Amino acid sequence: MTIIYTLSCPISNEIRYVGKTSKTLNRRLSLHLADARSGKYKHHTSNWLNLLLTQNLKPIIQEIDRGIVTGK
C-alpha cells in the first residue's frame, strides 16, 4: 500500500511538501522530524522542519491518495 501525503505549515496551512510512503503517516512524520534534527540532509524541507521545531511546532501531515503499487 502506498500513501501520497502532504506536509503543511501549522500556522498558514500552506502545503510545503508532497511525499509518498508505504509507512503509516505517524511513522513517516517521525522519520521526517528525526532526519531534520540529525542534520543528515541539507535541503529546504529539513530547514523548514527545524524552523518549526524551534517554535515548538510540527507540520500537519495529511493523506491525499492511497493505492497499491504493482510492478515498475
Image (cartoon, rainbow, N blue to C red):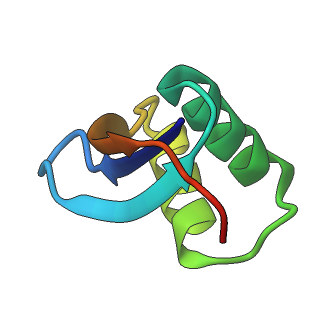
Residue lying at the far front in this picture: please name it.
Answer: 71
Query: Residue placed at 64% from the left, 45% from the top?
Result: 32
63 shown above or below 70: above
Q: Seen in the image, is 67 located left or right of residue 64? A: right
Query: Residue placed at 53% from the left, 42% from the top?
Result: 54
Quadrant location, the N terminus = top right
Residue lying at the far bottom in this picture: please name it.
Answer: 43
Query: Residue placed at 87% from the left, 62% from the top?
Result: 40
Please state which of residues 30 and 57 is positioned toward the viewer in this rendering: 30
Quadrant location, the C terminus = bottom right
Number of numbered discs on residues: 0
Please state which of residues 8 and 3 is positioned toward the viewer in this rendering: 3
Please state which of residues 43 and 67 is positioned toward the viewer in this rendering: 67
Residue 58 position, x and y percent, is 43, 33
22 shown above or below 50: above
Q: Seen in the image, is 29 located left or right of residue 65? A: right
Query: Residue placed at 53% from the left, 22% from the top?
Result: 26
46 shown above or below 60: below
Please state which of residues 6 and 38 is positioned toward the viewer in this rendering: 6
Residue 63 position, x and y percent, is 30, 37
Residue 36 position, x and y percent, is 70, 52
Residue 11 position, x and y percent, is 17, 43
